[in-house]
């Protein structure tokens, strides 16, 4: 699974990238929305994990733009915003899921594994979460 991570917070991005790569997910990182949009347009990603709070770019609009061109790419908004309205905006902008930045790493891993299992043409039940 190939993942694009878009987050201004370089420390958070490095931490998430390390988690993803430890779990054998190929991960590219963009530390701003403009670079993230360019990367999303050039490469095929299975998942885009993005913070909608991006410097110089409306992250919700970026999510809409990626969704319009990459209909089959899963989008997970990962944000410190966690009000009901923020979650609604995430889903309305095209995100498939939302996760607060106070998440446990295992929670992110479980969401990704669930997407892998659901996207498998055979829906292989032997795939383990361990």
Image (tube, rainbow, N blue to C red):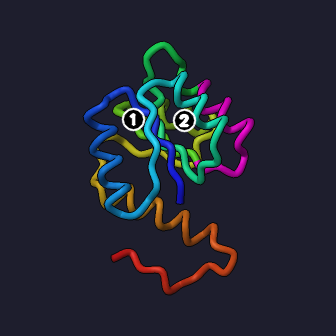
Counting residues from the start of the chain, the first of labels 1 and 2 encountered is 1
Magenta highlight range: 61-74
Disc ID at residue 55: none
The quarter in which the C terminus is drawn is: bottom left
68 in magenta: yes
Total labels: the figure holds 2
Label 1 – label 2 distance at C-alpha:
10 Å
Residue that sits furthest to the front in the current view: 42
- The chief SS type of the magenta part is helix
Q: Left or right: where does residue 72 sit relative to residue 114?
A: right
Seen at 67% across and 30% down, the residue is: 65
Q: Which residue is mark 1?
A: 79
Q: Is residue 112 above or below residue 35?
A: below
Disc ID at residue 90: 2
Q: Are marks 1 and 2 in contact (CB under 8 Å)?
A: yes
Assign a secondary structure to mark 2: helix
Seen at 47% across and 37% down, the residue is: 50
Seen at 36% across and 63% down, the residue is: 23
Q: Dot 1, crowdedness within 10 Å: few (<14), some or many (≥20)?
A: many
Q: Is residue 9 above or below residue 109?
A: above
Seen at 36% across and 42% down, the residue is: 100
């Amino acid at each position: 699974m190939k993942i694009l991570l878009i987050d201004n917070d370089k420390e958070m991005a490095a931490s998430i990238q390390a988690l993803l790569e430890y779990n054998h997910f190929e991960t590219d990182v963009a530390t701003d929305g403009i670079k993230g949009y360019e990367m999303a347009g050039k490469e095929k990603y299975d998942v885009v994990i993005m913070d909608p709070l991006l410097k110089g770019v409306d992250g919700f609009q970026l999510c809409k733009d990626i969704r319009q061109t990459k209909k089959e790419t899963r989008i997970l908004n990962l944000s410190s915003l966690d009000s009901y309205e923020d979650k609604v905006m995430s889903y309305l902008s095209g995100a498939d899921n939302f996760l607060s930045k106070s998440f446990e790493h295992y929670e992110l891993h479980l969401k990704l594994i669930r997407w892998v299992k659901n996207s498998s043409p055979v829906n292989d039940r032997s795939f383990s979460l361990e």
